[in-house]
Image (cartoon, rainbow, N blue to C red):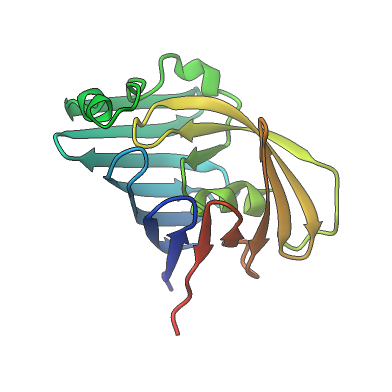
Amino acid sequence: MPRSLFWSRTDTAGTEHAVLDDGTGFAARGTQLAVDPIAYTCRYRLAAGPDGATTSLEVEAEGAGWSRRVRLERGAGGWRVTAGEQGDLDAALRAAGHPPAGLPGADDPDRLHDALDVDLGGSPLFNSLPVRRLGLAGAPPDLPRTITVAWVLVPSLEVVPAEQVYTALGPNRVRFASDTFRADLELDGNGLVLRYPGVAERVDAR
């Protein structure tokens, strides 16, 4: 049965609501609302196979005067990435005093070849993909596991390869690190993020 998950952002004003079905594989659709670097709405549809590896991700982001979309599909030959834009995100960013964003999509999808997981900027849901695929949620303290993900930046929807490190710290606790960033994630019994220090906390229905 599908589940509804809701997070409140702690790094900026914002929220995320996702509807998840993980009976067979992992399927989710969700919406992010945030105001950093400018106000935007981001909607996504995610699918992963029974092995936990991502098969597809569709993302749409929009704000005042602009919208962008990107689709990632993983097949035997690697990743296929398509993207589009309407309006002018860079103009909206400059008007708010921010530098322009990169183009949506990936300049060279072959650089994503080693990625089995995707990550969406600011979303605690996507950390659960490698946690569950690698069986880290209920694992005892262990050695770091280094992976490559296809990272979708928000709101630009630029797609870049990123190296991430996940380390089991004991039941329902996993350390996440990427470049100079590090956070100890608290998980529920299904490997879904409850608390992502500095980013978001889950709000459960009462």
Of 44 and 135, nearer the camera is 44
Of 71 and 6, nearer the camera is 6
List x then y, in percent, for residue 61.
27, 40
The picture quadrant where one finds residue 194 is bottom right
Q: Residue furthest bottom?
A: 206
**Quadrant of the rendering where the C terminus is positioned:** bottom left
Relative placement, left or right, of 65 versus 195 is left
- Total tally of numbered discs in the picture: 0
- Residue at (56% x, 23% y) in the render: 113
Q: Relative to 4, does residue 28 appear above or below in the rendering?
A: above
Of 71 and 168, nearer the camera is 168
Q: Can the viewer see residue 135?
A: no
Relative placement, left or right, of 18 versus 117 is left
Q: Residue furthest front?
A: 97
List x then y, in percent, for residue 205.
44, 80
Q: Relative to 160, does residue 201 appear above or below in the rendering?
A: below
The picture quadrant where one finds residue 63 is top left
List x then y, in percent, for residue 81.
37, 26
Q: Relative to 14, does residue 111 appear above or below in the rendering?
A: above
Of 32 and 112, nearer the camera is 32
Q: Can the viewer see residue 29?
A: yes
List x then y, in percent, for residue 105.
36, 24
- Residue at (72% x, 54% y) in the render: 174
Q: Relative to 80, does residue 19 appear above or below in the rendering?
A: below
**Quadrant of the rendering where the N terminus is positioned:** bottom left
